[in-house]
Amino acid sequence: MHCRAATIRPDNFIVGATGDWEVVIGLEVHAQVNSCTKLFSGAATAFGGQPNNQVSLIDAGMPGVLPIINEKCIEQAIRTGLGLNARINTYSVFERKNYFYPDLPQGYQISQNRYPIVGEGFVEIYVEGEVHKIGIERLHLEQDAGKSMHDTRNEYSYVDLNRSGIALMEIVSKPELHSAKQAQAYVLKLRNILRYLGTCNGDMERGNLRTDVNVSVRRPGEALGTRCEIKNLNSVRFIGKAIEAESHRQVELLEDGCKILQETRLFDPNSGYTRPMRSKEEAHDYRYFPDPDLLPLELNEAFIEGLAANLPELPDSKFKRFKKEYGLTSYDARVLVAEKRNADYFESVVGGCEGKLAANWVINDVFGRLNREGLDISSSPVSSDQLCSLLKLITEGTISGKIAKEIFETLWSEGGNPADIVSARGLAQVTDTTQIEAIVDEVIKANPMQVQKVDDNPKLLSWFVGQVMKATGGKANPRSVNKIVRKRLALN
Ligand code: ADP
Ligand code: MG
């Protein structure tokens, strides 16, 4: 397949050969619920176990056993709903979604269809300087299926049921996203909220956050176009690529006078294109009906209120608080709250110093360095305690910012305690003015030409300051040096 070049304007419209097109995207995110046991059985959910070692009779679809609802999973779904500003439904129903597949031993998946546990809500995303409010349609609970594995010689297929029966939350957005970037920001924000809540660990590589992307295009202002659904994207990068490829494919077809077939497609990372998986005609008839083994789920308000009262601080509130409490810019606050672990690191650093100083060091020196070295905050060689002590030394005037950078290098590569490093290496700032005055005088004496020129060229002042700093190995207080140089050169 080829692809004609089409541009995307800053307002996200695709510029086609026959005019503009608006991209419309709705996402279905499957998030694995954090809980030790499965949705309807007591089998463990831990990742990485020996195949088929975490399987109860229920998960294996044996007859004559009854599912029992795991209260923890219900709590997690409600807490997630609350975190998504959503209505919690006090009445919801588990239904059977019937289909045949080797990794589904029951022959049906227990899911929620007409009566989900969580109704409408919203998430705010920030993309290219703008905040967008994206509607959530619903959140429902369902069982995950097992996993098929095909051997490399294609001789046998194996089924691992460890995943079978683990609780998933399917979070369905309204079709209110209009670019790949917005969809990516939405998934990242959603994952961030789930991580703050502790309801899903959001690890896409392990498949515990999987996204189906629905894409259509239309002329601005017209009714929604026919959509295609791209299944099972497990990285933010692929979500973006799949949307771009699919929206351009649809624009080309429509501009050529063809119709879009409603179908399920797959994204092929190797070619960068989407290809058909099944059309609407081939779609399953799931024959949903209420599971006779499970009563409707009725919640009382006090239970919901109890969970609401104990929600942790979520990213948007933390963002506002960081700005207010620590005087941070929106940019810094946004970077810091984008991952809970990062925000926690910052908060344990900022105790001993001014907010802006801590934010600069955490974002530029720690995050920047971790990024370059492909590490994440949990494996940072410099702990928040070490950085906190280092920044205290700057704040107290014991060391200059420049010396602090050197000590940071040492902490990064060798570890240690900042105060000990300062005393062991004699790095404390020279604050004794007579000592500085003596060095200034030496520098002036050694550079008579420069002294003559400084009257006409005041820029030379900083050259003198630089020479003095160099002579002190960067240990003098730059402000005192500046003052003394001015005095000695009789500048004002
Ligand atoms: P299903 O996939 O079960 O048919 P829905 O019809 O509720 O479920 O839609 C699923 C997802 O598709 C939702 O996220 C919704 O926002 C999105 N969606 C629905 N219509 C369109 C459309 N025309 N273009 C893009 N996305 C759409
Ligand atoms: Mg769907």
Image: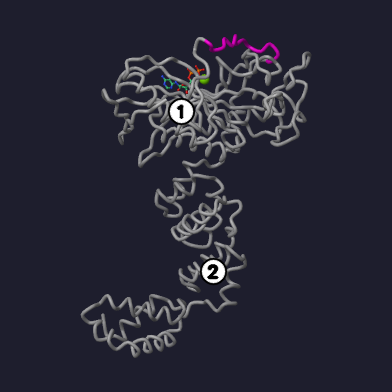
Kind of residue at disc 2: Ile
Disc 2: which residue:
407
Q: Residue 244 placed where, x, y %?
A: 41, 30
Q: Residue 399 placed where, x, y %?
A: 49, 73
Residue pictured at 68% horizontal, 21% vertical: 103
Can residue 152 be seen by looking at this rendering?
yes
**Residue 290 counted in the magenta span:** yes
Q: Main secondary structure of the magenta part?
A: loop
Q: Residue 9 placed where, x, y %?
A: 30, 34
Kind of residue at disc 1: Tyr
Q: Are marks 2 and 1 in contact (CB under 8 Å)?
A: no
- Color style of the picture: one colour
The furthest residue to the front: 153
Can residue 39 be seen by looking at this rendering?
no
User: In the rendering, which numbered label is found on residue 273?
Assistant: 1
**Residue 411 counted in the magenta span:** no
Q: Mark 1: few, some, or many residues within 10 Å (few <14, many ≥20)?
A: many
Magenta residue span: 282-294
Q: Please, what secondary structure does the residue beneath circle 1 have? A: strand
